[in-house]
Amino acid sequence: MLNRKTPKRLVSKTVAILIVLIMITCDSALAGKLFTMDAASFSQRGGLIYQEIFFLIQRDRLKFDQAVDGYEAEFQITVNVIVGDSTLSTTSWQIVDRALKLEDIKPTQKLPDLVAFNLVPGSYTIEGHVLDLKSEANYTEILKLDLTSFPEAELAISDIVLAMKLQKGGEGSKFYKNGFLVIPNPERIYGTDMDMLYYYVELYNLQPSDADYFVERTILDDAKQLVSRLPQKTRQKVGASLVEVDGFSLETLNSGTYYLQLKVTDSETEQSASAMAKFFIYRPDDFKDEGGVITRTGPTPLETVIRSYNEAELETAIAELKMLVSEGDWRLVEGLNEEGKRQYVINYWNERDPQPMTAVNEYRLVFEKRKRQAIDKYSIWDTPGWKTNRGRVWIVYGTPDDVEYHPHDPSTRSYEIWFYDSLEGGVQFVFVDRNGFGDYRLVHSSKKGELYRSNWFEEEAMIRKQ
């Protein structure tokens, strides 16, 4: 059995503040996300699964405040392991990141992290939360895992860890794995600034002998059709459980969705085992002609990102559309299967791209900017700001031209009136804090298609005396 670090115990705990020591610089086609989460499963003693959860934090999305020596960001990562309706464990830790100057913080800088658990086979929901302790903005990602036990006697292979950095050594680092420093790439996006794909995988139950084992490596396209075969590897067996690491150049592949497939064969027993991992390539130059003019020769960058969404991310993308589409269109979306919903999301954003020949979707960028603002301004308790009533209006209609703030007094609840002067000759939205906890609900609007209640003040704002 390969060496394992002690995983997090399945209890609620908070780990002391750490200083970020590793930072990766890489380009990305993802926009509007504070972090990305991924996972990989490995065999553990006693029939358990050694489950690693990976994080990649977007550094420039953190709030940096001035400190004694430069600037400082502080955030908390929380992982909930959920079975059914029960939370099996909650693990939290806090991280401090420091920069000498704000200009040193770039959009291409990422902060990797990971946590591991020993789990029995079964179905799990992994909730990852990142709380920016400076801005108090809270972000959530969800993974669905169906874990099956690894064979105890037959040749088996772990999940493939796609990495952005891999090298010998690194002992003492949380990214150290059986003799190698492996920095995972949860985004799984490669391209111009990251043209090497590294991978780490574990092999189990090789039969001890002088015979070799073989590793076949193929690249498949989005339809899982063969794109290329990498040179086959012939390895000498030095134990029953081994690590397989390598890397290869992606420079010949265009922007799109791909799969790396590894097939391992034990020449002694002729048993085989295989694993597959999806990855994505985005190169802005793929969308330019020889004169530097942007053209379309393949999927849009945004389409590449949406194709990468897991089930939970797709659910979020669909939930975003609920605030943007008509009731009739929403009923249509609800009736689609997973692939239909994915294609609907792609079509929705592509059809509204004001400059389809550019490498970015400006309409989507505006949406993401407003969504981030809504999260920062209106998040409350466990509800992200974009899911609140004020957040929805902010995202759909933008920044109001004026806001009247009416604080709580003995006769009225707290309420706000937002004014949009350029919409339909001037409209207003009224939000009331019904319970006094800061959760403002939309109770009236003069905007066509929105909730209209002429008696909103008497019914919602006034406090009735008993």
Image: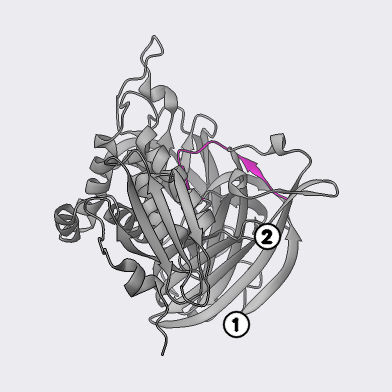
Chief secondary structure of the magenta portion = loop
Where does the image place residue 309, in percent across and percent down from the top left? 36, 52
Residue 392: x and y in percent read 37, 55
Which residues, given as a range, are shown in magenta?
20-33
Q: Crowdedness of circle 1 by 10 Å Cα count: few (<14), some, many (20+)?
A: few
Residue at the image position 56 percent from the left and 56 percent from the top: 55
The residue located at (32%, 35%) in the rendering is: 227
> Image quadrant of residue 420?
top left
Report whether 23 appears left or right of 253.
Answer: right
Q: How many marks?
A: 2
Mark 1: secondary structure: loop
Marks 1 and 2, the one that precedes in the sequence: 1
* Residue that label 1 marks: 11
| Viewport quadrant of the C terminus | bottom left
Instruction: Inspect the image, locate mark 2, and give the three-letter code of the amino acid beneath it.
Output: Lys
Do we see residue 436 in this rendering?
A: yes
Is residue 339 magenta-colored? no
Q: Is residue 266 left or right of residue 110?
A: left
- Mark 2 crowd level (few <14, some 14–19, many ≥20, 10 Å Cα): some
Taking the spot 66% from the left edge, 51% from the top edge, the residue there is 181
Tell me the CA gap for discs 1 and 2. Answer: 20 Å
Please, what is the three-letter code of the amino acid marked with disc 1?
Val
Q: Is residue 337 above or below residue 214?
A: below
Q: Quadrant of the N terminus?
A: bottom right
Identify the disc placed on residue 172. none
Residue 128 in the image, given as x and y percentages of width and height: 51, 65
Residue found at the far top of this picture: 291
159 over 287 or under it: above or below: below
Q: In the rendered image, which residue does mark 2 sit on?
A: 174
